[in-house]
Every structure is written in structure tokens, then in C-alpha cells.
Amino acid sequence: MNRLHHFDVLRAWHKEYMGINNYRPRTIKDYAFELSFFRRFLFEKTDLADIDDLAREHLHDFAASLYDSGICAGSIHHKLSVLNSFFSACYEQKKLYADLRAAINMPRVNKKLPAHILSEEETKTVFDYLESATDNLDVTTDEEAILLRDRAVFELLYSTAIRRNEATHLKIGDIDFDNGMVFVKEGKGGKDRVVPMGKTALDAVRRYQAEARPRLAAPGCDILFVNRKGRRMHDETIRESVMHATQGAGLKKHVRVHALRHSCATHLLNHGADIRYVQELLGHASLSSTQIYTHVSINKLKETHRKHHPREQNDFSQEKDNGNGPAQ
């Protein structure tokens, strides 16, 4: 029998188990990779015969090897989370007798926003560029159709804060133009949700759908945003779409698609939106996931405090001489 044979059997079982429990294909593939990564460590760095002999010290050594390799805390957290999920499933389904979850010490990860989040001024610059490039456009070529599409994509991403993968899987019927809503089906975690969409974004998508999409879409395709071949936009295509918009506007920094989601959430909070509304918009199961955006919006609060707090300005208003003493 091959060394680590039982571990390999459990990995195959776990892959099937995830499929039965409706995990997304990308998640199943990711877990399979991380478990293969852990197996390689066991095979090369230990003399274990199989997973039944796995002990706390082996898991500690694995975690230490990750830190020593210089992997960031977020990646270490992810790798250990996969192990924790794997051991949980094996133990709860009685595939392993030992509960190994307690031996995994998860690193603390300070969530932070990407460096290239758009400021409100930069966002306006991009929209000014897109409007000037498309407002008087008469679509007669594929390139002009792509330009209208790129404007519609940028408008939708910033207005709704939906994820890149959610945007590329939208179908024509998922936009409710009458009520200004977008139906996001099988978002992160396989959950559906409904999010509002602003009038400007709705107008941009409506125009794209009427003037540009018929020129681009392949017969029978019901996907909203399509590429030059008339099929669903893939990750690289939508990255290029956002890049063309930001570079065309003259922005020098690299703006990722996900930065529009972060920008929308941050700008909403800057303008006084309730954080629980933003949580629902983003589709976060936990409020703690949404609170990373307060680290940016707090800067505006601090600036307001500095400008207007009387103690900061040494400008306490003198009370009228009405006989009132200090407030009790």
C-alpha cells in the first residue's frame, strides 16, 4: 500500500462530499489544491505512514513552515482554514477518529482595502471620460459597441457593488429596468440577492443593450455582457474593460475590478449610508466583513472632527448674557 494512502482516499471522498453539498466548482478545485499542498508537506517533511498518525506537532510544523516561507498571513489563514474544514468533515462524518481542529491555530488577519481604491474625484474623472466618449456615439463598428459596453460595465459595477463573477454571469432578464433592481443569482456562497441600481447605470445598460449588444452577441446567447466573440465575458475581458475606462480617463494607477466594489461601499459610507444597508448591498453574511470600509470612511469623520470641533479650533462660542451658567 502506498504511503499516505488513507489520506488520498479521504481527499477523494472530501471532493465528492463537497460536490454533494453544492460547493461551487472553483471552491472544490481550490480545496483540492490546498490539500495536495498539505500532502506534499507530509510526504517530504515527515515520516508519517498516514493521516491516522497525524498529531498536533505535525500541524504546528506545517504552520511554521508557512510562516518561514514568507507567505502572507491571509494566505496562511486560507490554507489552515481549508485543513480545518477538511478535518471537520472527516471527523463529523466519522472518517477520522481524532478531532484535529483544536490543533490548528489560525493567524489573526487584519482585513484591509486594496491600495488602488478610487477616490470620489478619480471616479468622477472616469465617468466624465466615458460620457464624453459615448454620449454622441453612433454605433457603426465593433469598437464603438465595445466602448458602450465598457461604459455600461463600469456604471453597473460602481452602482451595485456586485462582484466581477456576478457581473459576468448576469443574464438579460436579471435587470429589472422598471424598478431599478438587479437580481444576483448564486453569488458568493451560492446565495441569491436583489440589489438596487441607480438611474444613470440603468440608462447606460439599457443603451448598451439596445445599440451595442445586438452587434456583438451570438445568436441564442442570453448573457448580458458579451465579448467580441459574442459569448460571456471572462475574467480577463472584464479586467480589460475596467482598465480601458480608467486608462482612457488618464488615471495612472492600476485599478482592479474589485476596487469598484470597494469604492462604491466606501463612498456610500462617506455620504452617510447606514453600514447595515451597505452590508446587505454587498451580500456580506457578517457585519464584520463590511466594517473594513469604515477604516477609509473614518478619515472623513476625523477631518470633519478636526474642522468643526470647538476644542480643535479653540473657538468655543460665547453664550449670550442671559444668566445661564454652564450646562448641568
Image (cartoon, rainbow, N blue to C red):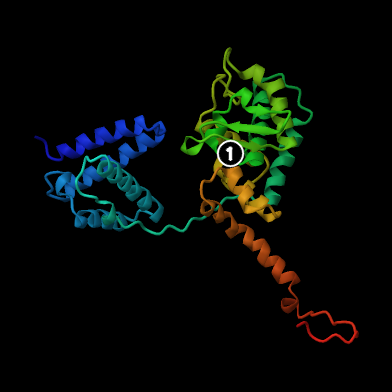
Spot the residue most to the left: 1
Residue 296: % across, % down: 60, 58
- Identify the secondary structure beneath mark 1: loop
User: Is residue 305 visible in the rendered structure shown here?
Assistant: yes
Residue 130: % across, % down: 71, 36
Three-letter amino acid code at disc 1?
Ile
- Among the 4 quarters of the image, the one containing residue 16: top left
**Residue 132 relative to residue 217: left or right:** right
Query: Where is the N terminus found, in terms of image quarters?
Result: top left
Q: Residue at x 65, y 21 (%)?
A: 213
**Residue 174 relative to residue 2: left or right:** right
Q: Nearer the viewer, residue 17 or 67?
A: 17
- Work out whether 181 lies above or below 117: above
Q: Which residue is mark 1?
A: 162
Residue 92: % across, % down: 28, 43
Query: Where is the C terminus found, in terms of image quarters?
Result: bottom right
